[in-house]
Image (tube, rainbow, N blue to C red):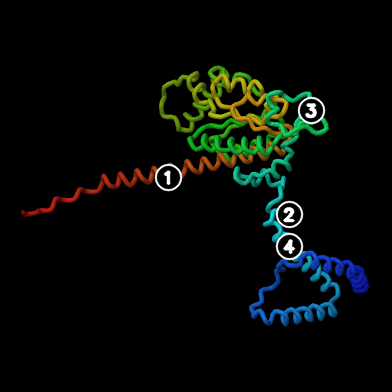
Amino acid sequence: MASTARLSRAAWRAPRLARMFSSAQETSAGFAIPEEPVDVPQADAEAVQVSREQTHAQLAAQDPEGAHDALERRIRRMRRAMMMDMAGLASTQTRDTSFRPFKVRTQPLEAHQLTLSHLLAATAQMGHAKQHVKRSFEPLLYGYRHGMAVIDVERATLPALRRAAQVVRGITENDGIVLIVGTRPDLRPSIRSAVERLGANGFHVSTERWLPGVLTNASKLLASATQYSVQSQRTQGDLKDESVPNMTKLSTLGYRPDLVIVLNPTENEHAIREATQCHVPTMAIIDTNVDPRSVTYAIPANDDSPRVAELVMGVLSKAGEDGLRRRRAALEAWDKHQRRLQKRRQEPAPLPSDTHP
């Protein structure tokens, strides 16, 4: 009974597979079909093809369902070969060239890998209604469609994001501190992933709101946290000095970032204002309803989309990781040079040779 059902199913699939095979042969004319490697001269290629067709016919007579499965696999192989050949002409999208949103957080892109299709797939071009667009943002617009603003991601977003990646790379290469601010719940996974890549040079504020005075009033607001940190270091034996440190000075100097990245600037205007007052450069995803002059490095994009935030934070965190890698390489080279100099100093000076005139 089961064999009869398989034969009937194979007979039902036979006309469909034959049509697919004929259409694939017509559309893939002139393209190379990956087959098993055959080490024969060119003159024997036709004979090999005839013997291969005879083998397929024998297999089809013995096992019709297996033959149809093999034919379907061959058609898929032909289509895949045609796709890969056409990918070099930029006329189709494959797994390597298409945007995959689920891998933005786990496998983020670097700045040189970012393309226009990535930004469009993340809906970075979507703006607000025309009546909410700031006048200072109009030079960064591509136009309007159905009353909605469209951001020019090719001339505004892509260059700004690449420049921001260079800034983050330079800050981490010089052992700077990067503070990431994002107070929406949907931004927390991307922020935490970015902070993990930055290591000890990255901090984040992902609570419900920005606590006023973190930068401008750090001497009073963070004194208790600094005192707790000093006491924990003493109990662990990391702090040898028994003198009482100045908590005001420690909290003022130890909690000053070198760059503040804001993912939702409309809800964190106070954080941008504090950073500007403390002469700390700011970087933010600026939508059409925000003045781009309010931050130092503006990235024009849709700040309401979590996918845009994941894409931007992935690019910036990879740039910061590259800066840390460069710093480690420079420190290792400097340490190696110092050891070489110390070894030369420890070597005994050569004795002067007795030369006679």
Report if residue 165 is visible in the image: yes
Of labels 3 and 1, earlier in sequence is: 3
- Residue at 87% x, 67% y is 19
Of labels 3 and 4, earlier in sequence is: 4
Q: In which quarter of the image is residue 82?
A: bottom right
- Residue at 68% x, 43% y is 116
Where disc 3 sits, the SS reads strand
**Residue highlighted by disc 3:** 129
**Residue highlighted by disc 1:** 332
Amino acid carrying label 2: it is: Thr
**Is 216 left, or right, of 11 in this rendering?**
left
Which circle, 4 or 1, is nearer the viewer?
A: 4
Where disc 1 sits, the SS reads helix
Which circle, 3 or 1, is nearer the viewer?
A: 3
The answer to whether residue 18 is above or below residue 107 is below
Q: Position of residue 347 (x, y in %)?
A: 24, 48
- How crowded is the residue under tag 4: few (<14 C-alpha within 10 Å), some, or many (20+)? some
- How crowded is the residue under tag 2: few (<14 C-alpha within 10 Å), some, or many (20+)? few
Where disc 2 sits, the SS reads loop
- How crowded is the residue under tag 1: few (<14 C-alpha within 10 Å), some, or many (20+)? few
Report if residue 209 is visible in the image: no
Q: Residue 171 carries which label?
A: none
**Residue highlighted by disc 2:** 92
**Is 325 left, or right, of 8 in this rendering?**
left
